[in-house]
Structure formats: structure tokens, C-alpha cells
Amino acid sequence: MSLKYISSNMSCIMKGLVQRPMEMKVKEIMEREINLAKLAGLLLTILGAWYLGYLFAAHVPEETIITSISNLQDIGKKQVLRAPVPKRQKCDHWSPCSPEDYAYRILSGGGKEKLAKICFEDELLISEEKGNVGRGINIAIVNYKTGKVTSATFFDMWEGDHSGEMMTFIENAPEGSLLLMVTHDDGSTRLKNDAKTLVENLGSKEIWNLKFRSSWAFIASKGFKLPDNIQKEKINHSDKKKNRYSGWPAEIQIEGCIPRNLI
């Protein structure tokens, strides 16, 4: 092997050793510059987004932003179907009477706090709000033709002698009248037999069964006949084992629709 050949090989080796580190250094520099460019691009994007957000917030009303965010939050929420609120019917009936009928509802008293009520065509004829309800038997008289109340009062059957007054009140009701009756507290203690007979003649089947603090509701007509298929009367007696209130039975009610063409 000649000295010239050895010298040539050594020269190539040395040249390779010098050239490789230089190539690596160039590559590192290029990668660093690329990373710096990416970082600069990211910073510019962030700054651009911030500036656009600033402009948006400065020119769009806050209320619009809040509404938009709220709408976005609602996306994906499962829609809940809600039933419409039932329409209130006359005298708080569950189902409406036809326009050709009168609506009525008679509710007895229940305990000391819940006083009796008589409602006709969505008008309270006797109630605490009207200030004309009292202990005993409450009676409202309605002109059937007009549907308007002509008289309403109560007769105390615990104190005093009001049985005769009640009879006079009923007897003075003109022909073509509706009579709506209901008890609050006691309606029997001072109710005399001739008054019971008078109410029985109007169609009551429970008046003779009335006891101390019985809850009783009744509707009758004078001079014409009511349909057989409507609620006319209901009674509930005081029972220590079953009373809803202390010494008082649960309140009872009757309600219905009366045709306007009976006369």
C-alpha cells in the first residue's frame, strides 16, 4: 500500500468528520427557525382572535350575547312537552256546561274555617267573600228565566227560633224560581217538622235525616220540574270515627248543568 493511497484515504475521512457536524448544525438551525415560525403564527392567531373578540364585545349589545350563549346551552337539551293549563270553567266545574245550560255548584261548610258556598253561573250567591254566609241553613233564590239571584240569606238553627222565618222565605219565592240550600255548622237542632215537610215537598229526600252538624246540599225548583239526571241532593253526617275535622264531618258538594229551556 503506497503512502499516496494512505494519504488520500485519510484526507477523505477527515473531510467526512468535518462535514457531518456541519450538516447536523444546519439541520438544527432550520428546525429551530421552523419552530419559531410556528410559535409566531400561533401568537398572531391568538392576538387576532382576542382582537376580534374585543371588537365583537364592543359593538354587540350584552343582552344579545347573553341570549346567544343561552341558546347555545339549550341546544342538545331534550325538549319537554308541557300540557296546556286547563281553562277555568264556570263555578270551578271540571268540565264545562254548554251555552244552553246554567252552571251551579253548592258546597257545604267544613270545620270552623271553611264556610259554605253557593255558586250559580260563576257568581257567588252565598260565600264568606259576600259576607252573607252563616251558621244554619243558607238559601239562595234565583229567577230561572234571567238566571239572576233575587234573594239570599241564612237561618241560624242553633240559637233563636228561625224555622218559621225560613218557611216564610221559601213560601215567598215566586213561581219559576230555583232554590239552592246548604248547611254550615248545625242546621237541624231548631229546625221544626213543618219546615222539614215544606222542604220535602220541594223534592228533598234527606231533610228528615238531617242531624247535628250534618253536611247537606240541595237544589230545588218551584213551578217547574228539574231533570232527573242532575245532582240535586247530598248529605254527610258527623261521625267521631270518620270526621275530617274535630267534631265536624267533611264538606260535601253537588254541581251540574241545568237546561235553560225548562219553562
Image: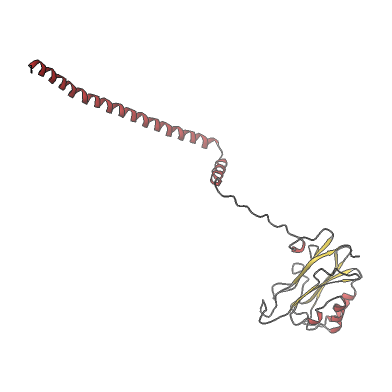
Which quarter of the figure has residue 134? bottom right
**Badge count:** 0
- Above/below status of 213 relative to 258: below
- Above/below status of 204 relative to 99: below
Q: Position of residue 32 (x, y in %)?
A: 30, 29
Which quarter of the figure has residue 48? top left
Q: Specify whether residue 106 is in view.
A: no
Q: Residue at x 75, y 61 (%)?
A: 95
Q: Position of residue 128 (x, y in %)?
A: 74, 69
> Is 44 situated left or right of 216 in this image?
left
Furthest-front residue in view?
1
Which of the two residues, 114 or 253, is positioned nearer the viewer here?
253
Furthest-top residue in view?
4
Q: Position of residue 117 (x, y in %)?
A: 76, 69
Which quarter of the figure has residue 156? bottom right
Q: Specify whether residue 20 is in view.
A: yes
- Above/below status of 132 relative to 81: below
Q: Position of residue 105 (x, y in %)?
A: 78, 67
Which of the two residues, 32 or 60, is positioned nearer the viewer here?
32
Q: Residue at x 51, y 34 (%)?
A: 55
Q: Residue at x 24, y 24 (%)?
A: 23
- Quadrant showing the N terminus: top left
> Is 101 situated left or right of 65 in this image?
right
- The structure's colour scheme is secondary structure
- Quadrant showing the C terminus: bottom right
